[in-house]
Amino acid sequence: MHEQQPSWHKTCLFPSLKKRVVKKQQGYFLNDLSQLTPEKHKMASGVESTAQNPTTKLTSPDEFFATCPNFRILVLGNPESTKQELFSKIFGVDLEKVRLGDSRAPHSRARHQDVALLTVLRQKLVADAFGDRHNIEDELDLEGQNERLAIYTSPNFGTDDEAVYQRVCDFIAARSSESHPLQEHIHCIWYCVASEEERPVSHLETRFFNGGLATVAPHVPVVLLYTKYDEFVGQVQLDWSHDAQERGLSKVAVTHILRDLATNRFEKTIKKRWDAVLMDDRGRYKIQQVPRVCVASGSDPDVDDESFGALAMATLDSLHTWKDWHVKLAFAAAQRNSATISTRCELPHPPQDALARN
């Protein structure tokens, strides 16, 4: 007897890809389930509808995401290390439209016409979101821009502020308690450090990555973001290019040399400092694996696509620490960076309740 694919296997995850069908092996991910024609319904189910073999009814998005309707992320950074492109490139969230507590950007035609004013406004919102006065308990009001996402922010531990550290650890611990349902947990942490910062890794950063997080929430993954990496590369190139021109090197030679020079400089400075914190003498992670991603500042489209795409995939891969597959699906629905992520969230075995419904 022919076995039908269960309905959980064929549910839309991408609100931004309306009326588009993405095929991966036998799995299809549809956006607007109400727009299914009989032909598309046949494609989505992988089974021809007949009297003897009726087409499987697709699960509604509300039912599919009932266990974990939102992906909840905690971003630790500061105005120097965290730019609004992190939110727009990955989650499609424009900080200009974000409400922080009781403050809201004034609505005026000028802010849509004046690029400089927009830049200042966004910088202020980033500064407010990662300022000492911002309450970590306050979820950013995204003004309906992404219904599958919840963002919490706090300063990172670069200043060795014990009060900030304790506040963050208490928040993570509370949001990891079994008394909270899965949908209220923090599902991932982005820890942001600026690539051009020449400061050493702080004492509290060392404590956090060497057991602090594992103590309060061992299953919550953290991704380390080296932000503004393109600006770091630009500075390295600027420092060296003047000498290269004086020595009469060709532009092609200079391009290759500068690329290798920037990589080596990064590995010998920033990466080396964090390796000392995260890795043991044998090159293994001391506590838990910490994905690390170099992220651009949003000024070069080609560089942006590569770096933000890597961040999206690293975030998805980090979620293996969660035994509940609903967390990965929540991230796939919240992110707006890559259609590939949707297909990577196919799971080999459906939950028992889904099988029972079929």
Image: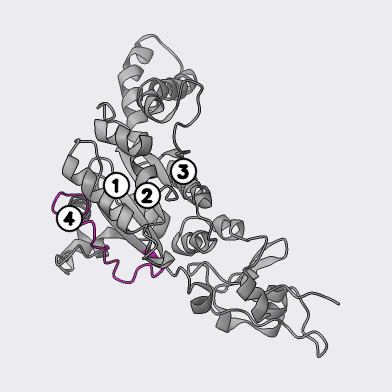
Q: Residue 143: within the magenta?
A: yes
- What is the distance, in whole Å, between disc 1 and disc 4 at their CAs? 12 Å
- What is the distance, in whole Å, between disc 3 and disc 1 at their CAs? 26 Å
- 23 or 117, which lies in front? 23
Q: Residue 28: within the magenta?
A: no
Tell me where the magenta segment starts and ends, as one range: 129-149
- Please report the residue visible at 20 percent of the width from the left and 45 percent of the height from the top: 164
Q: Earlier in the sequence, mark 2 or mark 1?
A: 1
- Write down the residue under mark 1: 76
- Write down the residue under mark 3: 302
CB atoms of marks 1 and 4 within 8 Å: no
CB atoms of marks 2 and 1 within 8 Å: yes
Lateral position of residue 336 relative to residue 154, left or right: right
Element marked by disc 4: loop
- 67 or 244, which lies in front? 67
- Please report the residue visible at 49 percent of the width from the left and 18 percent of the height from the top: 253
Element marked by disc 2: strand
Element marked by disc 1: strand
- Please report the residue visible at 79 percent of the width from the left and 74 percent of the height from the top: 3
- Write down the residue under mark 2: 189
- Write down the residue under mark 4: 134
**Mark 2 residue type:** Ile
> Residue 248's x, y, as percent?
41, 11
> Residue 305's x, y, as percent?
47, 47
Element marked by disc 3: helix
**Mark 1 residue type:** Leu
Q: Nearer the viewer, mark 3 or mark 4?
A: 4
Q: Earlier in the sequence, mark 2 or mark 4?
A: 4
Q: Earlier in the sequence, mark 1 or mark 4?
A: 1
Q: Residues within 10 Å of mark 4 (few under 14, many from 20)?
A: some
- What is the distance, in whole Å, between disc 2 and disc 4 at their CAs? 17 Å
